[in-house]
Amino acid sequence: MKLSKARYEFLSTYAMGALASLAFCAVAYFIWFASDAYYSADCADTFYWAIASIDSGKIFNPDFYYGGVYPFGGSLFFFPAYWIFVVSMACAKFGMFLFLIFFTAALIFFAKSLGFNWKWTFASCFVILAALSCSIKLREIYFLHIIYYSLGNFQYLVGAALIFQYLKHRKEKRSTLFLVLAVLWLFLCSTNNLEGIVLLSLPLLLSLGFLVITEQKKVQLAGFIHTPLFFLCLLVLAAGSGYFFGRLLTKDVACGYAGAYSGFSDAEYWPDAFAGAPFQFVYLFCERNIGSVQFQTLDGIIFILQIAFSVALLIVPIVATFYCKQYKTTAERFVLVSHWATTFFILFAYVFGRLDSANWRLSPLIMTSLLVSIIFVRHLWAQKGVAKRFAVLLLTGCFVFAGVNSTRVLSMNPHEQQYENLQGLASYLEKSDIEYAYATFWNSLPITFMTNGKVQVANIEIRDNGVIHAHEYQSFASWYSGHEGHVCALLLTQSEYATLSAYEQANIESVEPWNQFLICRLRWDIFPR
């Protein structure tokens, strides 16, 4: 029996809703149950920024040394989590789960503002959530902490949707609401310094400016306040004032990491960075152990699928650029222009700057490429003949990719490597009488919340002469004092222990091996010094 069009739309919409729910549940499962084995020092930053603000009652804590300064940043998601769970793994996971909810809501708001029906909205959520969780590195970037990569994508979705809503309703009374919200949103997001400007403000403003130039034929003073040009002027003022307000807020804040990558690299590295960028983009979708996988194995087939999907994300936006004249709405052309604006800024910093030291700094392009590709495929789907068949081919590949990766995430073992990593060490320390400890950067930051605050671990560095010094990056200055009369320890690897000077070793009362670590109990606290 042939289905009626109405019944087909009904069933297909619910099918897409089920797939979107699958992808959402897969990411939620990873956050709550399967993420313990993947927490590293990098994943602790947003959590500690929230604690620093709450403890000091200020936007930025003068006692804390920040890795990045974002007044309107991801740490806001951890405020309610901290008030419920205090310092704990549950707090870290709840904060990320809140971000997942808001991120998904932003995707839906964006898609509906583009004019998508619910079927295409759910399909977009399914593919995007699955793509952003398909590898270890992407899951870490998007769903283990919230910094400018994922934060910029989230804020872009909301900002662009607000602009679309204003442009759609600018001749109606409710346009004032969207105008105020868009101006306020751009102001707040632009306080996140250069990262907020590059990943949100400039792409949005350049896209709107491009549309004003190409689509607004003439400017009349009568009714000027209802024109896109006036809206653009307001957004420029909001972004500029937000940026300078953010600089004012952060001028005295101790921060080193983000600023270290905002300069030029030596010219001799530019050709290699440019030539390697597409391959590094593709590698973001692959697991770290890909070099040991055979083509014909199940993992090999999955990797081939991931590589094909990532290569398509590089090619489809280029094809879509030549197709854009057939786009019916301003919003769809807006997304295409903003993608290329973001691509230009990211690649400029990657090729000529210092971003090429880590391929995950290309990750913001994944989101914009996905959005452009989905819009393009949706237009092909509405055509007939070869275009329609090509859309079916692309959608089939996308759904297979998304379904396989969501299923893989749901099948992850929640106890994977639990007793071979920091989570296992934290569980061991939580049962001991140790109250304060010191460890090098990669082994220090996550343990405090993994032990639910029972063991406070500060960051140290061991100099070439074997002497221990405080390394306050992403740490509280107060964590290096006031430990007299408490049980303190060093958490070191075998190689780190071997580099200690005779003076430092004389302070060690006992050494207890645990897996690859040595738990060195101290006779006296090593700080302040």
Image (cartoon, rainbow, N blue to C red):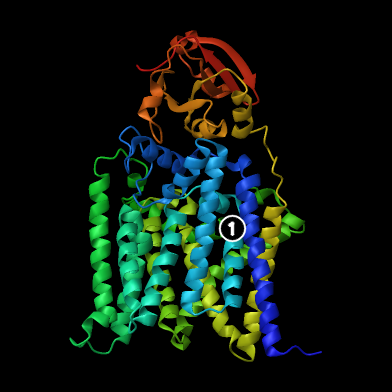
Number of residue marks: 1
Residue in the image at 34% along x and 36% along y = 56
Q: Looking at the picture, how far across and down is residue 277, in whole percent? A: 48, 59
Residue in the image at 35% along x and 74% along y = 207
Residue in the image at 72% along x and 61% along y = 301
Quarter of the image with the C terminus is top left
Residue 200, picture quadrant: bottom left
Label 1 amino acid? Phe
Direction from residue 222 to residue 183 in the image, left or right = right
Direction from residue 478 to residue 485 in the image, left or right = right
Is residue 237 depicted above or below 88 in this figure? Answer: below
Residue 185, picture quadrant: bottom left
Comparing 92 with 294, the one in front is: 92
Is residue 275 depicted above or below 112 in this figure? Answer: above
Q: Element under label 1? A: loop
Residue in the image at 58% along x and 62% along y = 129
Direction from residue 396 to residue 280 in the image, left or right = left
